[in-house]
Amino acid sequence: MVAGEYSRVNFSLLPHNRLWKAFGDSANLIPKLLPELIPSIEVLEGDGGAGTVQKFNFKHDLKHLTHVKNRIEAVDDDNRVVKFRVLEGKDIGTVLKSCVYELKMDETSEGVRRRL
């Protein structure tokens, strides 16, 4: 099993409140924006908040990765932070014991900074 941490920072010119709202509707938006990669996202449990389980279905030509299932652990609308855990998918249980993501959006003079 592998232990470690990965961090990435992106900037967006969209206002943080608009970007955060779009992220909240990602189950509908992502398949429309990336149909060649993720044709559908199923909400298996929940209403989009903490405890929600989603299944991201990948295009069949990604034979090494057909889907990823995750659970939203926490959502903090005031600070624009969401934390989710990967439950099922490539490498979970073999290479990785677990995988937790935290996405945070900050507004800066350069635009919205997204940290994953």
Image (tube, rainbow, N blue to C red):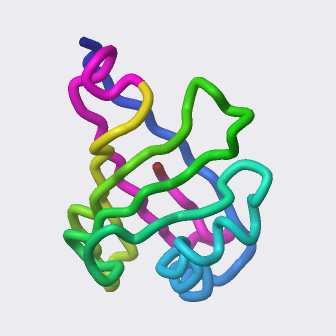
- The correct choice, above or below, for 29 with respect to 36 in the image is below
**Residue 111 among magenta residues:** yes
* Residue 8 placement, left or right of 96: right
Q: What main secondary structure does the magenta stretch of the protein show?
A: strand
- The correct choice, above or below, for 104 with respect to 8 in the image is below
Q: Nearer the viewer, residue 25 or 109?
A: 25
Residue at 35% in and 79% down: 48
Q: Looking at this view, name the residue that lies furthest to the right.
A: 36
- The correct choice, above or below, for 75 with respect to 15 in the image is above
**Residue 104 among magenta residues:** yes
Q: Nearer the viewer, residue 112 or 71?
A: 71
* Residue 97 placement, left or right of 6: left
Q: Quadrant of residue 89?
A: top left
- The correct choice, above or below, for 48 with respect to 59 in the image is below
Residue at 47% in and 79% down: 24
Residue at 50% in and 54% down: 56
Screen quadrant of the N terminus: top left
Count the marks: how many?
0
x, y percentage for residue 78?
A: 32, 85
Q: Quadrant of residue 12?
A: bottom right
x, y percentage for residue 11?
A: 67, 59
x, y percentage for residue 84?
A: 31, 56
x, y percentage for residue 20?
A: 52, 79
Residue at 30% in and 16% down: 94
Q: Looking at this view, name the residue that lies furthest to the front.
A: 60
The residues colored magenta run 91-115
